[in-house]
Amino acid sequence: MKKGNKLHNQENYDFRSGDKDQHHLILYNDEVNDFSFVIESLIEVCNHNSVQAEQCTYLAHYRGKCDIKNGDLSNLKKMKDSLLERGLRADVQ
């Protein structure tokens, strides 16, 4: 029996389901930073692999925002602050 293909394991795409105590790091589109810089930032700050980072970057660009990470509030705030320092638009919800 053939198993379905998985692009990657990323537990943070569907933030509408799951634990209520889970917080979400949201990346917003901007008109300032180029794709390569955003991708590099997601790899370095959020420990995304290159595929995850590229997909999140394109989703944020074309949809206006993307849920890039789930987790506890303190870790996500640190990541948000690092992204803000790089000039990206991000928030924790």
Image (cartoon, rainbow, N blue to C red):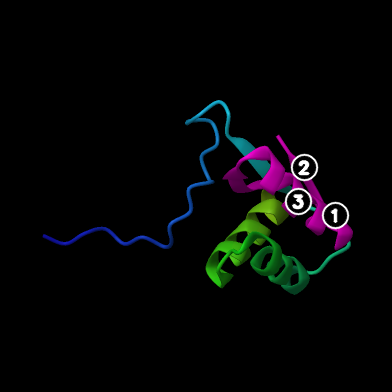
| Residue 78: mark in rendering | 3
Judging by the rendered image, the residue that carries numbered circle 1 is 84
Measure the C-alpha gap from mark 1 to mark 3.
Answer: 10 Å
Other-residue count near label 1 (Cα within 10 Å), few / some / many at <14 / 14–19 / ≥20: few
Snapshot quadrant of residue 9: bottom left
The amino acid on which the numbered mark 3 sits, given as a three-letter code, is: Lys
Residue type at mark 2? Asp
The part of the image, by quadrant, that contains residue 67 is top right
Residue 4: image tag: none
Q: Dot 2: few (<14), some (14–19), or many (≥20) neighbours within 10 Å?
A: some
Q: Nearer the viewer, residue 64 or 46?
A: 46
- Residues under labels 1 and 2: Cα distance? 9 Å
Above or below for 7 versus 79: below
| Residue hosting label 2 | 91
What secondary structure is marked by label 2? strand
Residue 85 counted in the magenta span = yes
